[in-house]
Amino acid sequence: MFQYLTFALVFMGSLAAPNLPPIHYTISRRGGSFTAPDISNLTYLLEQLQVVEFRFNATTRAFVENKVVRKPRRLHGTQASSTLLGDVGREGNWFASLHIGDPVQDVDMDLDMLTADWYIFSTSSGTGSFYLDFNSKTYIEAETPLPFPTCREPKDIVHLPSIKRSIPISFALCRPAKQWIRTLLPSGAYLGLAPSTALSQTKTASLMTQLVENNIIDNQVWSLVLINGKDGIFSIGGTSAPSLRRAAIETDDELIRSRTPEMKRDGLVVSRTATEIETEAVLSSTEWKWSKVQGAEGWWQILMRGIWVDGVKALENQPIVLDINTPFILAPPIAARAFYFSISGSRQLPPPYDQFHAYPCFNPPKIHFEFAGWNEEVFKGKRDKGTFSPGGRFSLGRMAAGSGYCVGIVVESRMGKGIPLGAEKGNIGPRTPMEGANGLEDVWIVGEPFFRDVQFAFDWKEKKVGMQRV
Ligand SMILES: *[C@@H]1O[C@H](CO)[C@@H](O)[C@H](O)[C@H]1NC(C)=O
Ligand SMILES: *[C@@H]1O[C@H](CO)[C@@H](O)[C@H](O)[C@H]1NC(C)=O
């Protein structure tokens, strides 16, 4: 009890004493955990890596009012101007369940840290999850169309879990025309979580902004904590380990009311593991450690001060972009090679798999990520419970049946195509390319594996990222 209290006090102090309770959503990874077979499937891993690079490659950088900002890459073709960033219903996206309308409709809401728009995408494909405006008594039609083609901005009642409130919220409702190819894509809701509105295409008010304006939340923070490879909790308006369990239980109630028996079971899994996480957080947490967002305005990019391999600093001052929907850790080629150089017995795979490196399974490296004022051991321990895991959590599986080598979770990116044009403010690194380039040649993409090690808080007002051990 005493420990619990201490934790609560530390916690309140470090997050500027929020007055209103946060909203907690349980989240899941579409398609389940990223597959971690005993023997890796390099064809599959390479395909997934290309999916990641494709998602990151959808934006570029530009000068806007003397600032470097990230913005959607200009596409060509007649339907290009109506192409929204993001992949609604994509396998591997983390998503929550949006309850909207009267009677309540249950729409999958994908989370995306690389985009900034809040919209519902409605196609005639018959796949994905649907919002039917004509079935909702509380739907309010938009008076004027949005400047973005195929989208309008209506309102409907959104039912918020855990705090149990319902309020009218506006959103972009986008419907590609019947003859367009995009109408073959899945339907669903999409919540962009990027910190910069420069990435916004619809130029509508985000869900978060509306929650603040309506005094539903007063802490401009959202947070993520993963429980395992397929369940987690997404909180808006704060983050709080002590209330996690309660949140999970309440969400269970809703799931029990609205979902199939299968989903109900998933909800219960979340609540049980959330209890375990709470206990751990109470025992080991000291306080949140914050890092300022830096680099081109757009994504959640922070500075990693050091990467340590078996007690030796292998790299320092590496800019990283955080993205929960990436199942790997991507490093610029030079950095990846320096990293594996520090792991004895490791080697780069031959083409076409040369983005991957392997290391002796029996001897996984001890890796620490260092940030301003703290240091965290990452990727330690076993992979998902109940699985045989040669090489531990750092492993993507054995290279082949009977092989003593495992494929490492740190992989080389091939995204950086820099055209040096000018200096990017606040970006530490020897090369600083600009316009036309995507600016990813010196940047790490730190994905879901690291989200398993820490709980994150994203402060979109102060533009900073908080982390603490889970
Ligand atoms: C490996 O992945 C590829 C591409 O996803 C798939 O077609 C193939 O069936 C997989 N092989 C095995 C042995 O699972
Ligand atoms: C990124 O996009 C550019 C322009 O569309 C293309 O030339 C390049 O090959 C893409 N790179 C990757 C890694 O997808």
Image (cartoon, rainbow, N blue to C red):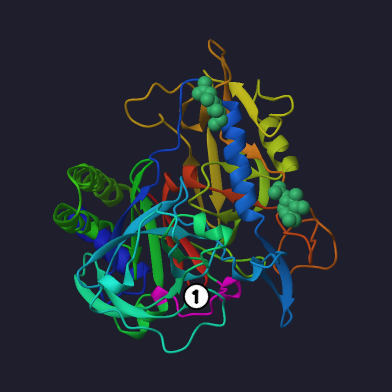
**What kind of secondary structure does the magenta stretch mostly adopt?**
loop
Camera-side residue: 240 or 358? 358
> Which residue occupies the extreme front position in the image?
179
Identify the residue under disc 1: 151
Element assignment for label 1: strand
Residue 156 in the image: state x and y as whole percent: 31, 77
Give the total of numbered labels.
1
Residue labelled 1 has its Cβ within 8 Å of some atom of ligand 2:
no
Residue 172 in the image: state x and y as whole percent: 45, 75
Please tell me in which quadrant of the rendered image residue 431 appears: bottom right
Please tell me in which quadrant of the rendered image residue 191 appears: bottom left
Camera-side residue: 346 or 233? 233
Camera-side residue: 107 or 461? 107
Residue 12 in the image: state x and y as whole percent: 30, 68
> Which residue occupies the extreme bottom position in the image?
143
> Which residue occupies the extreme top position in the image?
402
Rendered-image quadrant of the N terminus = bottom left
Q: Is residue 88 visible?
A: yes
Magenta-drawn segment: 196-208
Q: Residue at x 30, y 59 (%)?
A: 25
Q: Is residue 309 visible?
A: no
Residue 94 in the image: state x and y as whole percent: 41, 51
Q: Residue at x 45, y 37 (%)?
A: 34
111 sits to left or right of 68: left
307 sits to left or right of 31: right
Camera-side residue: 10 or 338? 338
**Mark 1 residue crowding within 10 angstroms, few (<14) / some (14–19) / many (20+):** many
